[in-house]
């Protein structure tokens, strides 16, 4: 069986949070895993989806069939940790650990194609508006715009309770 890997290093999310999502998609066919990642709202899903799509593109470059691909392994390891301090009361400091993750995903080709349960429809692309080539010239004021507008009638309530005193 052919294998294809993709790796994401230095992801600024704690490994424990990424492993939660990785456990969801392990051993799933590629299309189903993609659907799961699209539907979940955790922040790690965005990056795992991007990594999965990258692995799929790598596999297709190696002449592997997308309908037969499934996630054989997904490994989330601890990356380096940024150590910072947060000032607290009475001159103390609390340590902060900003953790990072390294994610490795391995796709394999199975003997038979997976049954499709989901259809992923990409969002429609917005059409760009064509810019007008004519330079904008200042408008000539029409006679209607140059007329002086009459002040609106001020009611009793407005006179009595005005903001500025007279």
Image (tube, rainbow, N blue to C red):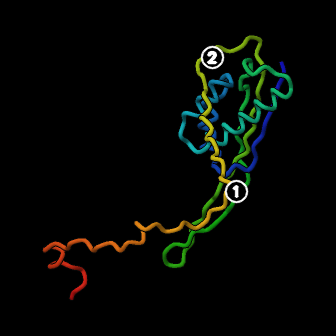
In this rendering, would 36 be left or right of 114?
A: left
In this rendering, would 71 be left or right of 120?
A: right
Residue located 82% across and 22% down the image: 64
Can you name the residue that lies furthest to the right here?
Answer: 62
Q: Residues within 10 Å of mark 2 (few under 14, many from 20)?
A: few
Give the answer, above or below, for where 105 lies relative to 78. Answer: above
Q: Nearer the viewer, residue 164 or 8?
A: 164
Local SS, label 1: strand
Can you name the residue that lies furthest to the front here?
Answer: 143
Q: Nearer the viewer, residue 147 or 61?
A: 147
Give the answer, above or below, for where 54 lies relative to 165. Answer: above
Which residue is label 2 attached to?
Answer: 116
> Which x, y percent locates residue 24?
60, 30
Circle number at residue 164: none
Q: Residues within 10 Å of mark 1 (few under 14, many from 20)?
A: some
Can you name the residue that lies furthest to the bottom here?
Answer: 166
> Which x, y percent locates residue 141?
49, 68
Residue located 53% across and 40% down the image: 41
The quarter in which the C terminus is drawn is bottom left
Cα distance, mark 1 to mark 2?
40 Å
Residue located 66% across and 28% down the image: 26
Q: Nearer the viewer, residue 88 or 22?
A: 22
Residue located 25% across and 84% down the image: 164
Give the answer, above or below, for where 87 lies relative to 26. Answer: below
> Which x, y percent locates residue 69?
74, 22
Which residue is label 1 attached to?
Answer: 81
> Which x, y percent locates residue 86?
57, 69
Local SS, label 2: loop
The quarter in which the N terminus is drawn is top right
Question: Which mark lies nearer to you, 1 or 2?
Answer: 2
């Amino acid at each position: 069986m052919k294998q294809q890997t993709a790796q994401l290093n230095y992801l600024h999310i704690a490994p424990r949070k990424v492993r939660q999502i990785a456990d969801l998609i392990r051993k799933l066919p590629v299309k189903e895993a993609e659907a799961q990642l699209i539907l979940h709202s955790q922040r790690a899903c965005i990056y795992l989806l991007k990594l999965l799509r990258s692995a799929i593109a790598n596999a297709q470059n190696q002449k592997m069939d997308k309908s037969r691909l499934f996630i054989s392994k997904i490994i989330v390891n601890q990356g380096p940790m940024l150590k910072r301090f947060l000032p607290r009361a009475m001159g103390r400091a609390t340590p902060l650990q900003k953790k990072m993750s390294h994610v490795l995903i391995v796709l394999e080709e199975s003997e038979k194609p997976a049954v499709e349960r989901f259809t992923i429809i990409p969002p429609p692309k917005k059409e760009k508006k064509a810019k007008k080539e004519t330079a904008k010239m200042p408008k000539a004021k029409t006679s209607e715009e140059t007329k002086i507008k009459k002040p609106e009638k001020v009611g009793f309530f407005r006179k009595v309770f005005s903001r500025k005193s007279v």
